[in-house]
Image: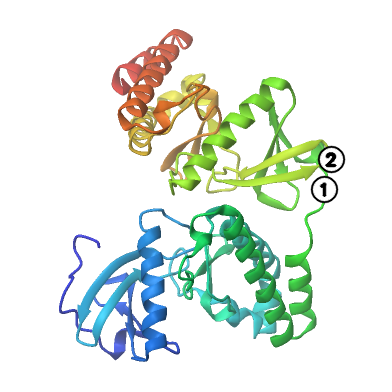
Amino acid sequence: MRDNIKLNNVILNEKEFIGMGSHRKCYIHPEDDSLCVKILHDNSKAAKKQLSREIKYNEKLKGHNIPILPKYYGKISTNMGQGYVFEFVKNVGGGTSKSLLNYLTSDILLRDNFDGLVDALKRLKADMLFYKIITMAFYPQNILYKKDENGFGRFIIIDDIGSAALIPIEYYFSFAARARINRKWERFLNHIKIKYCGELVNRLVKQVSANDETIVLSDEYFIGKGSHKQCFIHPKNNRLCIKLPYNKDGEKDVKRELKYFNLLKERGVDCDILPKYYGSVSTNIGVGYVFDLIKDYNGQVPQNLNDYLSSDILLEANFSILVNELKILKAKMLLCEIITMGIFPINILCKKNSENLYSFILINDMGSAALIPIEYYFSFAAHNRVNRKWEKFVKYLAKKYSNSLVQELVKQIR
């Protein structure tokens, strides 16, 4: 629970009322409008059982930062009984997120947001498979479409999560989780097609359920090429990129990095200094691996740290920002125990979140090549490795860049 929020005797009233389902009412938290409080209004055994299942599942996932679920903060007592505090899902910049039901029942909303909804539904399924999110049922009214600052969004599941099985094997075995998710997804699409008939709805279901086909990559989508891998914009989603190895060393790199990304996923580590990994795809030039395409707030491809350190003008204009963000980068590497083969300026993207607000993102050389990577399992070993790699990185900067400002930067980030 957030430190400044009361845990007990919270007074809820009708002005904070959001809505009501078959079993629960929902209120905006009176002390923090970024949170909501769910209250059970149906005291039947079935309602209590459903609530208990969902809370247990939320407790299981707590701290994992699952992007398709609202964060759960815990229990509170209220004037209306026991309450359960969740993140209140809003669009970036404000405004309550609409449910998929709102879009399916409005031709205008559906038409105006069609491409974004198709993309978000495909991404939702990919995220459910990636994070192994188990649901009891899957209905449009329980999925909110959270829009970003550009009007695109992602779906957030707000109800009916978890399994009612006495021994939920899908919690522990990936094959069982995938099988259940695929079954629920198929029923979900059939439900939409039958209940919300219409040309646009049928087209949406068709596009969302279309089988993956070979993606054709061409020079039109080419971003760049390193010593082992090449990178393309995803032809069907310009917010994603596809990385492909083109030599044996590249294949070795990819194998190591994917093993590491999968380990982070299993542990629920969601560190914002790494791009998200979405899985593999078949392309005309081989198997590709799909990641977030990092962009500045204005849609431009970010410059890397080497670009800034190699330009006297950029370095002088952004010196304080670079020092601060490099310190933050190291702190987050230690906090999240991010393991790298090495740290190089060309592999650090300096993403602009606004004109003067940056965040640094590592885009290459993740993981360990050790036969038994103890740094994956012991914090002391992870911290030692991060500190060693950082010291080598700092020495590399001091040697490669002769500019006096770089030398000053090196002193400040050691």
The amino acid beneath tag 2 is Asn
Residue on which disc 2 sits = 284
In this picture, is 3 found above or below 166? above
User: How far across and how far down the image is residue 89, in percent?
Assistant: 43, 69
In this picture, is 243 found above or below 7? above
Quarter of the image with the C terminus is top left
In this picture, is 135 found above or below 320? below
Residue on which disc 1 sits = 214
Please tell me which residue is depicted at 36% across the width and 16% down the height of the picture: 391
Q: Horizontally, is 370 left or right of 73 in the view?
A: right
Quarter of the image with the N terminus is bottom left
Please say if the residues under marks 2 and 1 sit with CB atoms less than 8 Å apart: yes
Q: Horizontally, is 12 left or right of 132 in the view?
A: left
User: How far across and how far down the image is residue 283, in percent?
Assistant: 80, 42
Closer to us: 315 or 30:
30
Query: Which label number is shown at residue 120?
Result: none
In the figure, residue 55 lies in which quadrant? bottom left
User: How far across and how far down the image is residue 110, in percent?
Assistant: 68, 77
Q: Secondary structure at mark 1?
A: loop
Closer to us: 192 or 12:
192
